[in-house]
Structures are given as structure tokens and as C-alpha cells.
Image (cartoon, rainbow, N blue to C red):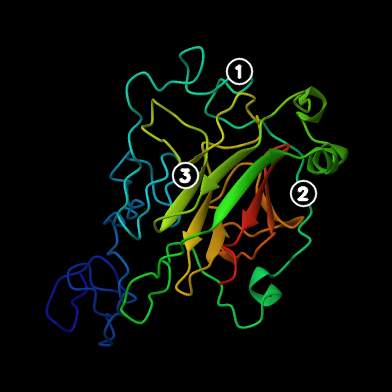
Amino acid sequence: MPTCPSGHDSASTDFCDVCGMRMDGAAAAPAPAGAPAAGVPAPPAVPAEPCPQCGAGRTGQFCEVCGFDFASGQVPHPAAAGDAAPGGTDAAAGAGSDQAAAVPDRAAAVPDQAAAVPGQAAAVPGQAAAPGADGATAPAAGWAVVVTADRAYYDSVIAQGGPDAASIEFPQYCPERRFQLNGREMRIGRRSVSRGLEPEIDLTGPPADPGVSHMHAVLIAEPDGTWGVLDPGSANGTTVNGGEIVAGVRVPLHDGDRIGVGAWTVLTIQAPPAS
């Protein structure tokens, strides 16, 4: 039986069965750094960070299921008992499931949101609002959004076709709603009692826009006192002035800007009067 340079008896004639040394005296090539040894299973992949509110895997700054903000640790306010939408379900008539109805894909009129506003740094998923001089986000008081059912926006969405386009009708009546912007974040979506999600800008209805997700978009206070909007990855996307924004990229807002969500809902930004 052959003997390796270290004195081990080996049934193999090229490498020692005991120590792995070449039978001609050269050392066996080491395994690549970090590679598991032969016969040893590779370590399991590290799972995504779970949301502390609902347990869903993290994909960005905001949980796509319950709206939890991983950057600030803000937990959505649980809906109070009896706050369920009409009919005792999580959504109003025409939106009885947690899944937003599919509406036609909108072509991105603004391919690069960061380049749309010179000097404005684009946010990335998981990035908190930039701090002000004192390290905290400056308050953005006096701003508001006016929510309306916009026929022109609806026509542009339906004209692009889609699996549910033929079944989505423009509401005969939809009252105008106004929301004052305050705090650091204002979530746009639909209330869900089962998930404990109650967005600050609640578009539950009636009438309920079937294309609006429970966690559709977030308005975020900027350090300079203005606001920006971010889509965390909604099913049907979000537009600003007709151009679809990139999911996870925060886009600055100005007085009169129009945010389109769902099939017919438009939120018009109103800045505070100049002093």
C-alpha cells in the first residue's frame, strides 16, 4: 500500500486518504476561503428582517403589509374597536379584499426622479429623512392635501388597458376631502382592522378606489419644511404630475403638485401661504 510523505498508508495513489497531501510530496490545494468543507452543508441563508408589527419580511423602509417604518420605529396606530368600514370588513364596498385591484401599468414619464429636481438627493429604500441642523427633521407645518376623484386621471389610466380596466367605473359622486399634513410622516392608503393599519390619509371611502393599496404611499417631512412622497412598492404605483415615480425613491413636492394613486384618486398638494 502506498505511503504518503507524512507516513500514512493510503489506498489512493494521488492524494493521501488520511491527510490529503499529494503522494509526490506537494501539499494539497486548500479549499477557497469561506467555502464549506467537502460533505459539510453550506450555512443557511440569513432570513429577511421581520417586521416587529406583523412579522412580514422587510423589503425596504416601510413594511408593505402593515406600514411599519423601520427607520423611525413608528408603529401604525391600531384601529379602535368599531372602526371597521361599512359592512364590517376591512374595506368599503368594491374593495373587500386586502389586495388592490390591478389597474393598467402607467408609463414612467419621469425616468429618473433624482434628476428631475437639480440638487435634490434621491432617497433609497430604508433611508430615513435627512436630519436638520439639530439632527431632527424640521417641522413642515401649514401644508395640506386635497383628495378628489379626478375624471381626467381616471380616463388616462383606463385608456392604457389592464386586466381589471373594464370592471372599474368612475364614481358618480365622491366628496372632496382635505387633510392637514403634520408630524414626520403621513401614510396614504386604506384602513385595515385585521392588520391594525389606520393610515393618516385614509382613502377607504365610500366610494373606495379599488386600485389603492392598504399601504400605498407615504408623505415625508423634509428638513427644509417641505414634503416629499415615497411609494414603498404598491401594487399599482404612484404618479406625480402624470409621471410614475420609482418605488423606494422619495420625490420632493411643491405647491400644486398632483399625486395620482389607484384608478381615479388624485391628491393635490397645498403649501402654506407665503408670509
Residue type at numbered disc 1: Ala
Disc 1 target residue: 93
Of residue 252 and residue 244, the one placed in the foreground of this image is: 252
Q: Is mark 1 on a helix, strand or loop?
A: loop
> Which of the 4 image quarters holds residue 105?
top right
Q: What element carries label 2?
A: loop
Residue type at numbered disc 3: Glu
Disc 2 target residue: 106
Residue type at numbered disc 2: Arg
Q: In this view, does 12 lie above or below 86?
A: below
Of residue 12 and residue 240, the one placed in the foreground of this image is: 240
State how far apart marks 2 and 3 are (Cα): 20 Å
Q: Is residue 191 above or below residue 245?
A: above
Residue 248 seen in the figure = no
- Residue 100 % position (x, y): 60, 32
- For disc 3, the neighbor class at 10 Å (few under 14, some 14 to 19, many from 20) is many
State how far apart marks 1 and 2 are (Cα): 25 Å
Q: Which of marks 1 and 2 is in front?
A: 1
The answer to which of marks 1 and 2 sits earlier in the sequence is: 1
- Residue 66 % position (x, y): 41, 40
Q: Is mark 3 on a helix, strand or loop?
A: loop
- For disc 2, the neighbor class at 10 Å (few under 14, some 14 to 19, many from 20) is some
Disc 3 target residue: 64
Q: Quadrant of the C terminus?
A: bottom right
